[in-house]
Amino acid sequence: MEKLTENILIESVKQGLDYSADNLDMHTRVRLTRIRLQAIEQNNRSSSFFHVPSFAHGFAAAAVVTLFVALWVLPNADQMLSPQSVPPVSTLVMPETEASASASVLDGNEMDILMSHEEMDFLENLEIYEWLEAEYG
Amino acid sequence: MVWRTEREMMDTTALITGHNDPLKQDSPGRNALASMARMNSFLRGVEHRAFVIARLATQDDEEALDIVQDAMFKLVQKYSSHSDGEWGALFHAILHSRINDWHRRQKVRNRWRVFFFRSDDDEDDFSPEENIAQTQFPEPEEQVLQAEMSKTMLNAVGTLPLRQQQALLLRAWEGYDIAETAKIMKCSEGSVKTHYSRAIHSLREKLGEYQ
């Protein structure tokens, strides 16, 4: 039997493969098209993220910093809100000088009183008691 | 949406944006769109052949589609900024690398399967004829003959060892020279020559009777 020459063999292989590639069934063609478009689309999505205007990058960076700071500070917020750290009520309703004076004497016991359900008359007169104590000892 | 030409893409863009004037020549957005249109055109040109190559190697349509998908995604993600002329070799390098990975995984799976399910071997006998693409419509006699020849050829190529198959497809079908084929297959030029020569020898023996 005469041997196939390499050229004829290669030509036959090419024809056979070309025929197979040109005659794929419709289902496969559709799926290949979908895959190709998905590949192009995912690149468009990722590239559009990197092509946003520069001010948006700045805004994003600022947002990240703000978030970081917030997360850094928030764990200490409960300490700030503890009874010892709450500013005395008197500082909010009294003139500044009196407030600073009374703040110095307002200790943990007074806060306990404030937080408890004492009579409001007593609390309203508390400033007078403090003044009397300061004046006449 | 599939654009056939860059011009068609620009016309579509003009329609969408409501601008009759073409986009400015030097805008980065336009360049990116044009690049993606070229990439789309390139992939459309190679997708069928890539599928045939992957199917020959895996003998499975689904696995072949997965491999082609991986190759397309990686090319677009990593190499779309490269020049168009490089895409062909890069795409084939990725495709054949994925095929090699798939074969490695299959070897490991088969080893475990043989170990655990020795008795099931008969049921899983591989039949290449079942995996050959079928044409959809009845064909004239000449086309039937051509289809038959294609089927025979695919069977013959499909039974070659993987490396021989790759060397043959890259050299004979895709038209790469020995150096390019070696680069794509990640082996020496000498190995390419050996694989190719063995592939031709095997095919000659297998197809001799069809002469």
Image (tube, rainbow, N blue to C red):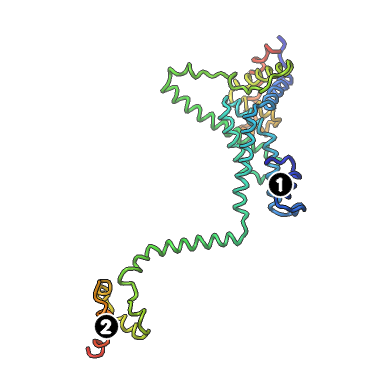
Residue annotated with mark 2: A125
**Mark 1: secondary structure:** helix
Which is more toward the observer, B81 or B5?
B5
- Is A105 situated above or below B189? below
Would you call the spot at circle 2 few (<14 residues within 10 Å), some (14-19), or many (20 or more)?
few
- Residue B117, by quadrant, is top left
Q: Quadrant of residue B73?
A: top right
Q: CA distance from mark 1 to mark 2?
A: 81 Å
Q: Quadrant of the C terminus of chain B?
A: top right
Snapshot quadrant of residue A60: bottom right
Left or right? Give the position of B96 relative to B139: left
Mark 1 closeness class: few <14, some 14–19, many ≥20 residues within 10 Å: some
Amino acid under disc 2: Asn
The residue closer to the viewer here, A37 or B35, is A37
Query: Looking at the picture, which amino acid does disc 1 mark?
Result: Ala
Asked whether, in this view, residue A80 is left or right of residue B66, the answer is left
| Residue at image point 31% right, 82% down | A102
What chain does mark 1 sit on?
A: B
* Residue that numbered label 1 is attached to: B34
Which residue occupies 36% across, 79% down? A92
Q: Position of residue A101 (x, y in %)?
A: 32, 84
Residue A6 in percent (x, y) is at 72, 20
Which SS class for mark 2?
Answer: loop
Q: Chain of mark 2?
A: A
